[in-house]
Image: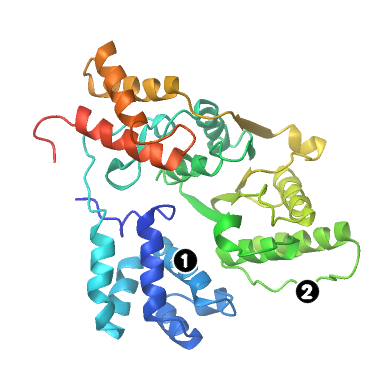
């Protein structure tokens, strides 16, 4: 069995329930530091001035990256036995097995996550762009589209690709919608990114000068600190730059980060952004890949099921295909990718899982 705690998906419901449960058990600063240290992690790398609800995602992700998430959970249960049953229930919800599906090429995956419990629909261009990203040819990727087109949904394939052991890649996510409750400025986004990378989160820059100068100073400080990190490939994903709470300074600082990536000043870094207006420098445009989303259609659902049929070597008739698509559309609308993907995944497992498979 594949356990969620060993292969966590930070975008699913289990992650949210886990963080809510942990936050109910421990929310005081000193308690959180003690747990972080008890898990074998260095507390000086985290900005402990944030609310506990914002700190728990950082704590669990850091523990998972260090291979210490299971230890951290056991530590919490030992310190607060009353929360143990709740944590067990949350983490048992996704003990699954999808061993019947194992594509040879990660970028072509149609089912992702622990137990292959997430369907990935469409994303033909993104699949090709991520290969370019991995091969170091195009280090910047911009994903755009109308609200609700599924820009954030692309993260599932990006995280899946970054998790390829052959890449030895570190994946870091800053999600505007989840990480910020209200207005976010250039300093805020850089502070969040620094925290994700385990870098100092103080930026001694002049906040009362012109915005362009503040942006340059923020990125200069970040570049200097980034150089001290161990050398490895890092995929940095900044999601939600088209949200209404995002200031123009955030767009400027992300464009400046892209310039530093293009110039080789952030060694091993690949920058992926969603919702950026696209005003990158000419030099960045030369090394940038762009995915413009237009929404999922019934033909994408058909392609998903045909792809699975080819993978398992099980022919699918036109009538069977139509029935599968109708089944999915009976549960979800095409413009709700999260629900649509879940419905497609359930239909796929019911139809394609070989007899006798777990």
x, y (%) of residue 83?
28, 77
**Residue 312 to residue 275: above or below:** above
**Label 1: how many residues lie within 10 Å, few (<14), some (14-19) or many (20+)?**
many
Name the residue tied to disc 2.
Answer: 204
x, y (%) of residue 233?
54, 49
Name the residue tied to disc 1.
Answer: 57
x, y (%) of residue 205?
81, 70
Q: Residue at x 72, y 59 (%)?
A: 223
Furthest-right residue in view? 210
Going from N to C along the chain, the mark reached first, 1 or 2, is 1
Indicate left or right for 130 with 73 as reference: right
Q: Marks 1 and 2, Cα distance to the nearest angstrom? A: 26 Å
Report if residue 114 is visible in the image: yes
x, y (%) of residue 140?
65, 40
| Mark 1 element type | helix
Indicate left or right for 69 with 279 as reference: left
Q: Quadrant of residue 8?
A: bottom left
> What number of labels is visible?
2
Closer-to-camera residue (300/265)? 300
Q: Residue at x 36, y 66 (%)?
A: 18
Closer-to-camera residue (203/342)? 342
Closer-to-camera residue (304/32)? 304
Furthest-front residue in view? 330
Q: Residue at x 67, y 61 (%)?
A: 189
Report if residue 175 is visible in the image: no
**Label 2: how many residues lie within 10 Å, few (<14), some (14-19) or many (20+)?**
few
**Residue 44 to residue 290: above or below:** below
Please name which of the two marks, 1 or 2, marks the residue nearer to the observer: 1
| Mark 2 element type | loop
């Amino acid at each position: 069995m594949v356990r969620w705690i060993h292969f966590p998906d930070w975008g699913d419901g289990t992650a949210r329930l886990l963080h809510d449960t942990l936050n109910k058990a421990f929310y005081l600063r000193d308690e959180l530091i003690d747990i972080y240290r008890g898990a074998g992690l260095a507390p000086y790398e985290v900005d402990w001035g944030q609310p506990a609800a914002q700190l728990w995602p950082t704590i669990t992700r850091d523990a998972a990256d260090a291979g210490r998430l299971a230890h951290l959970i056991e530590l919490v249960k030992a310190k607060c036995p009353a929360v143990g049953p709740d944590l067990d229930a949350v983490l048992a919800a996704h003990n699954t097995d999808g061993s019947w599906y194992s594509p040879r090429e990660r970028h072509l995956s149609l089912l992702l996550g622990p137990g292959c419990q997430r369907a990935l629909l469409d994303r033909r261009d993104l699949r090709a762009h991520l290969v370019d990203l991995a091969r170091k040819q195009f280090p910047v990727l911009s994903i755009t589209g109308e609200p609700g087109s599924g820009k954030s949904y692309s993260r599932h394939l990006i995280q899946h690709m970054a998790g390829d052991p052959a890449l030895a890649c570190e994946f870091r996510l800053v999600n505007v919608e989840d990480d910020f409750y209200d207005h976010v400025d250039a300093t805020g986004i850089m502070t969040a990114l620094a925290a994700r990378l385990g870098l100092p989160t103080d930026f001694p820059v002049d906040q009362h000068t012109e915005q362009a100068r503040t942006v340059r100073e923020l990125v200069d400080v970040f570049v200097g600190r980034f150089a001290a990190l161990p050398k490895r490939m890092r995929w940095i994903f900044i999601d939600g730059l088209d949200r209404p709470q995002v200031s123009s300074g955030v767009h400027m600082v992300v464009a400046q980060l892209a310039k530093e990536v293009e110039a080789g000043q952030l060694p091993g870094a690949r920058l992926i952004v969603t919702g950026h207006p696209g005003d990158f420098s000419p030099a960045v445009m030369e090394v940038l890949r762009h995915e413009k989303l237009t929404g999922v259609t019934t033909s994408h659902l058909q392609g998903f099921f045909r792809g699975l049929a080819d993978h398992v070597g099980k022919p699918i008739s036109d009538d069977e295909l139509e029935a599968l698509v109708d089944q999915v559309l009976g549960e979800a609308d095409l413009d709700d990718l999260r629900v649509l993907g879940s419905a497609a995944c359930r239909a796929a497992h019911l139809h394609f899982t070989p007899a006798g498979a777990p």
